[in-house]
Image (cartoon, rainbow, N blue to C red):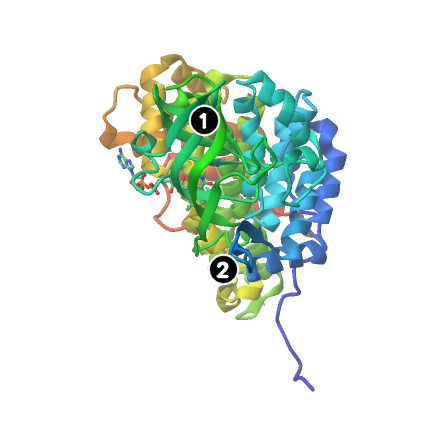
């Protein structure tokens, strides 16, 4: 028999991740996807069930296993996943998180998908990798009409089919991306993988990729050196003749986090592929995909912050120390409110950016996505670490989910352009497309507030690489301030401006100044189920 257990918060299960999130709910309608409310609501309930939460736990406790060869010594190159991985994948694919804007191209489809992806990542971040890459691959496939005609219908399917067979025999398909090589990831011009032309836009690839996530996808977009320079190729796991393509998995990476997802090292030994776009224009071609996956890095980071915040709020509401609930302790209230403001600002910015994709507002998105990717993914590790501390010692223990969030937190700032590379991209966008900066400044000016005006006046186009991070940070904060001022509860907006713009703030979370309406911030942060 156990002794009586006291003062331990109940597990946070069986709640709706969507209906308890006012910022996401309001943004879904505001940014043009009110029509998707019922589906997002239903999905939010599903991923909040004890069952779905357990799938996330199991998929990470039982990481994928690589089988390079069969028992007779033949190559197999298959990855085996725990059934829980397939459950979360099936749920995501059935909800169209991998294809919604392409399969149902209606206004608001990117926004609806962003909301769904945010809920998926809050439950289990790893599986969103292949889902995101598939979504992002479509604009690139459309460079080749025959390829798009053959593969888009497979991607449009909402059947999750994990079987290892030629895509023509499957009920649905997923697509990955492999650019990074051992000698250089950010600098893809250093790629050494060679593409040997065999005629009719077909090539054999020879070389390797150092990171190739989700290798059980049905096909990959790959960069390789063709005679005219670095080019983009489409490489299916099965060659057109019906044989397994020469895509050989070397090992799966033992990673800090993102453990449910397989990230492989792979070699190509004459792998069949076809050219996408022009030879020598590989970077320009694949950038379209990268642009979309960068949006997903923002969504994924906003999701991690949201989940961490909710876990911290839940704990603080139920846990008592020194005579009252933690949520009633003034200093804890300062910490939680500060975390809530950060999470709110991330959510409103990510949903505004998703709308730019719906509207085809490329000028705005070109700069604003880089700015958002830099800042929101950069804020996540500190945010999640602080939320973990709110849960005390329990937060350091695996069952609380906080260690998984913490391990995942730095990733979105590394892949799809690490912090410096993105900050340099912000400078490049400003230098090459001055109208992009004007568009972002116009958006900032939509909020009429002297604090925002003063802060934004410090943004200059003429800057050196040395200042790249400062510029990206300032633009992000001004953009978030403008959105929060227009769309969030006034108490959130006041706290954001006082701390992030006027710098009445410390270096750690929990240093908001006095005089703010902390009560309102905490009340709106999470509608407790
Ligand atoms: C879990 C995981 C999964 C991944 N999956 C994939 C995948 O599926 N497909 C794929 O193609 N890649 C994948 N990647 C690779 C990822 O995109 C690269 O790791 C990333 O782009 C950085 O490249 P790199 O590792 O070669 O680092 P480097 O390019 O060597 O960069 C190292 C550091 O130097 C900085 N840096 C680089 N250039 C400059 C500069 N000019 N000025 C200042 N600083 C600079 C970077 O910001 C970074 O901080 C994955 C990575 C991880 C961690």
Residue 426 at x, y = what percent? 36, 26
Residue 44 appears at what percent x and percent y? 70, 44
On screen, 335 above or below 107?
Answer: below
Residue 482 horizontal side relative to residue 229, left or right:
right
Q: Quick one: 84 or 120, which is closer to the camera?
A: 84
Side (left or right) of 263 relative to 159: left
Residue sitting at x 31%, y 36%:
420
Q: Height in image: 246 above or below 483?
A: below
Q: Which residue is mark 1?
A: 203
Q: Residue furthest front?
A: 72
Could you tell me if residue 370 is visible in this image? yes
Q: Nearer the viewer, residue 452 or 346?
A: 346
How far apart are the two marked residues, 2 and 1, measured between alpha carbons?
44 Å
Whole-percent x, y for residue 448 in the image: 48, 21
**Can residue 457 be seen at all in this image of the molecule?**
no
Image-quarter location of ligand 1: top left
Using a 10 Å C-alpha cutoff, classify the residue at mark 1 as few (fewer than 14 neighbours), some (14 to 19) or many (20 or more): many
Q: Position of residue 252 (x, y in %)?
A: 46, 53
Is 420 above or below relative to 320? above
Determine whether label 2 and label 1 are within 8 Å by CB.
no
The residue under the point 34% across, 19% down is 228
Q: Which mark is residue 403?
A: 2
Q: Picture quarter containing residue 61?
A: bottom right
Left of 340 or right of it: where is 253?
A: left
Work out which quarter of the rendered image holds the N terminus and state it: bottom right
Instruction: Give the foreground label among 2 and 1.
Output: 1
With respect to residue 32, does 21 lie above or below?
A: below
Disc 2 or 1, which lies upstream in sequence? Answer: 1
Provide the secondary structure element on which disc 2 rests. helix
Q: Quadrant of residue 451?
A: top left
Q: Residue at x 40, y 18 (%)?
A: 279
């Amino acid at each position: 028999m156990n002794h009586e257990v006291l003062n331990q918060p109940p597990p946070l299960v069986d709640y709706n991740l969507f209906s308890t999130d006012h910022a996401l709910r309001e943004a879904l309608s505001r940014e043009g996807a009110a029509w998707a409310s019922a589906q997002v609501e239903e999905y939010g309930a599903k991923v909040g069930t004890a069952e779905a939460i357990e799938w996330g736990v199991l998929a990470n406790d039982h990481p994928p296993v690589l089988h390079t060869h069969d028992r007779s010594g033949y190559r197999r190159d298959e990855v085996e996943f725990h059934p829980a991985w397939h459950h979360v994948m099936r749920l995501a694919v059935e909800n169209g998180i991998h294809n919604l804007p392409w399969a149902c191209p209606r206004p608001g489809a990117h926004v609806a998908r962003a909301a769904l992806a945010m809920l998926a990542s809050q439950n289990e971040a790893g599986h969103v990798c292949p889902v995101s890459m598939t979504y992002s691959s479509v604009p690139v496939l459309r460079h080749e009409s025959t390829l798009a005609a053959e593969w888009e219908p497979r991607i449009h399917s909402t059947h999750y089919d994990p079987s290892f067979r030629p895509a023509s025999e499957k009920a649905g398909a997923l697509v990955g991306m492999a650019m990074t090589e051992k000698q250089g990831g950010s600098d893809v011009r250093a790629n050494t993988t060679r593409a040997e032309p065999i005629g009719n836009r077909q090539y054999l690839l020879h070389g390797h990729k150092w990171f190739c996530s989700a290798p059980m996808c049905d096909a990959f977009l790959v960069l390789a050196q063709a005679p005219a320079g670095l080019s983009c190729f489409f490489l299916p796991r099965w060659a057109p003749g019906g044989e397994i393509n020469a895509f050989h998995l070397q090992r799966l990476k033992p990673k800090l986090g993102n453990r449910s997802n397989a990230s492989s090292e792979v070699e190509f030994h004459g792998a069949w592929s076809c050219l996408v776009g022009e030879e020598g224009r590989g970077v320009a071609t694949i950038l379209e995909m990268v642009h979309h996956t960068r949006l997903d890095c923002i969504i994924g980071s906003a999701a991690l912050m949201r989940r961490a915040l909710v876990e911290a709020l839940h704990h603080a509401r139920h846990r008592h120390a020194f005579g009252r609930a933690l949520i009633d302790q003034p200093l804890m209230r300062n910490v939680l409110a500060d975390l809530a403001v950060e999470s709110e600002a991330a959510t409103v910015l990510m949903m505004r950016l998703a709308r730019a994709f719906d509207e085809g507002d490329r000028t705005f998105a070109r700069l604003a996505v880089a700015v958002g990717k830099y800042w929101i993914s950069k804020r996540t590790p500190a945010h999640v670490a602080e939320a973990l501390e709110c849960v005390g010692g329990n937060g350091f223990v695996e069952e609380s989910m906080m260690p998984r969030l913490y391990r995942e937190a730095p990733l979105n700032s590394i892949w799809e352009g690490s912090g410096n590379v993105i900050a340099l991209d912000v400078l490049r966008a400003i230098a090459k497309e001055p109208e992009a900066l004007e568009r972002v400044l116009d958006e900032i000016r939509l909020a009429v507030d002297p604090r925002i005006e003063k802060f934004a006046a410090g943004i200059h186009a003429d800057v050196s690489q040395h200042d790249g991070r400062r510029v990206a940070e300032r633009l992000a904060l001004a953009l978030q301030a403008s959105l929060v001022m227009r769309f969030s509860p006034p108490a959130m907006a006041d706290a954001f401006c006082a701390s992030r713009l006027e710098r009445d703030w410390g270096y750690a979370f929990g240093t908001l100044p006095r005089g703010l309406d902390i009560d309102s911030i905490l009340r709106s942060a999470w509608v407790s189920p």
